[in-house]
Image: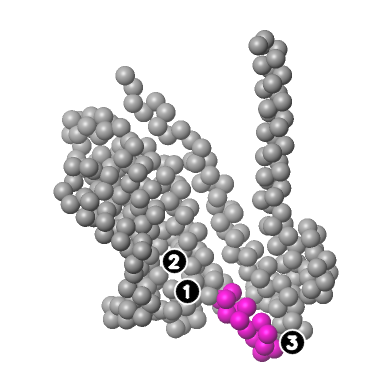
Amino acid sequence: MTTHDMTRGYRVFQWFNGVVLALVVVVTLYPFANILARSFSSQSAIAAGEVNLVPKGFNLTTYKIVASDPMFWTNYWNTVVYTVIATLIAMVMTTCYAYVLSKKHLKGRKFLVGVAVFTMFFSGGLIPNYVLITSLGMKNSIWAIVLPNAISVFNLLVMKAFFESLPQDLEEAAAIDGLNTYGILWRIVLPLSKAVIATMILFYAVSFWNSWFGAFLYMDRSDLFPVTVYLRNLIAGATGADSYGAAAAEVTQVGANIQAVTIVLTVLPILVIYPFVQRFFVSGVMLGAVKG
């Protein structure tokens, strides 16, 4: 095969690859564009199925109803605080636990792994968990949301497998240089684990951001709710004319596109953060880490 044939074949591959990726992008973006268009469309246009990629009967009624309520911004700020603190605690606990489990010489390692895996298939149940949270005095506090979900076993096993793949030569060399276990973790392991750490941060942040049932179950005060509970209550009350002090016509409009508005308001922060995290997914963090 000549160089000319290889070049022509590679160009055909590039063209084909570009077409396929473009189709994937279109298929991926279409639902988001449709939801965004529905959030700005009128009730009649949505009901008639006329909304596709461009809003029909453009209006901001639902957004105005939501944004004019001070409780919405209070709950939105609660969500930011809950997500940041919960993700920080979850990452510290998951990273430490995973690093320990990655050491094959650890005594009782199989038992600790078994305890973690056991919780993936069995739990105490809703009522025992509620009694536990209440008896510990965590009801109506951030800890009721953070601590019960501080470690995701799936994320734990992913980080454990990643730490096991790191070359032991690096840690042994660091130990010879005088670093203790914490120094090795902080100065050697974590800098080489940016990809998996960024991925786990995104997983945890999305999970805590979208979570609503824990707050709905353990919190009685509306000023402590996350925005997901606020929007859930807005959907539940969209059929009543007295909901949030709105007029009957406005509530009807809310009932038509509240789901689209909910998705937009919930997904937007994650879409803003994702590009800053995504670059770690494709970086070769271990390239050239071990030489000789």
- Quadrant for the N terminus, please: top right
Q: Is residue 48 left or right of residue 203?
A: right
Q: Is residue 278 left or right of residue 132?
A: right
Mark 3 or mark 2, which is nearer the start of the sequence? 2
Mark 2 or mark 1, which is nearer the start of the sequence? 2
User: Where in the figure is residue 114, as x and y percent of width and height?
Assistant: 26, 56
Amino acid, disc 2: Tyr
Residue 53, image quadrant: bottom right
Amino acid, disc 1: Phe
User: What secondary structure is marked by label 2?
Assistant: helix
User: Where in the figure is residue 235, as x and y percent of width and height?
Assistant: 62, 78
Residue 270 appearing in the image: yes
Density class for disc 2 (Cα within 10 Å; few <14, some 14-19, many ≥20) is many
Mark 3 or mark 1, which is nearer the start of the sequence? 1
**Looking at this view, is 109 or 144 the one in front?**
109
Residue 177, image quadrant: top left
Above or below residue 8? Residue 178 is below
Q: Which residues are magenta?
A: 230-243
Between marks 2 and 3, how big is the CA–CA gap?
34 Å
Q: Is residue 69 left or right of residue 223?
A: right
Which residue sits at x=49%, y=41%?
Answer: 281
Label of residue 248 in the image:
3
Which residue sits at x=64%, y=63%?
Answer: 264
User: What secondary structure is marked by label 1?
Assistant: helix
**Looking at this view, is 143 or 18 the one in front?**
18
Q: Which residue is mark 1?
A: 213
**Looking at this view, is 25 or 233 the one in front?**
25
Amino acid, disc 3: Ala
Label of residue 82 in the image:
2
Q: Are marks 1 and 2 in contact (CB under 8 Å)?
A: no
Density class for disc 3 (Cα within 10 Å; few <14, some 14-19, many ≥20) is some
